[in-house]
Image (cartoon, rainbow, N blue to C red):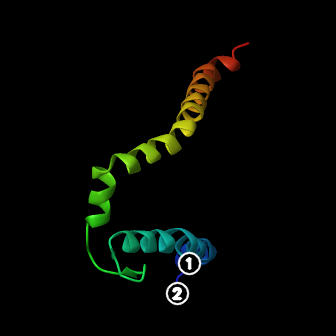
Amino acid sequence: MSRAANPALRRLWRLLPTLFWLVAFCLLPLCLIVAYSLGTRTEGGGVALGFSLENYLRFFNSGFYLLVTARSRAPFIPPSSFSTKLVDAYARCLPTLGKA
């Protein structure tokens, strides 16, 4: 193995624990959520895995689910827009700070 490949290989080895945690605790749960959301309900209340858009059709065609989603998102919209404006104002002032 050449000396030029060693730094790249060392970087890869350093990233492996981070990649493992990212996959194990972010990507894998997200894949499970998508898989269950595409499944259908069984009589006992379980989920039969498969491909069905029934759950998404029920969500978008029901006023109740959309109302609940809008109400749960509403408290987070003003703070996020406020923080965006704050960061934008700081970015605009940054070039002038060193000219004092």
| Residue at x-position 42% and y-position 43% | 67
Q: Above or below — where is 12 with respect to 67? A: below
Q: Quadrant of residue 8?
A: bottom right
Q: Which mark is residue 1?
A: 2
Q: Above or below — where is 99 with respect to 46? A: above
Query: Which x, y percent locates residue 75?
Result: 57, 37
Separation of residues labelled 2 and 1 (CA atoms): 10 Å
Mark 2, mark 1: which one is toward the viewer?
1
Q: Tag count in the figure?
A: 2
**Residue nearer the viewer, 11 or 56:** 56
Query: Which x, y percent locates residue 92?
Result: 57, 21
Precedes in sequence: disc 2 or disc 1: 2
14 displayed left or right of 53: right
- Assess whether mark 1 and mark 2 are in contact (beta carbons under 8 angstroms): yes
| Residue at x-position 30% and y-position 58% | 58
Give the residue pinned by disc 1: 9
| Residue at x-position 74% and y-position 12% | 100
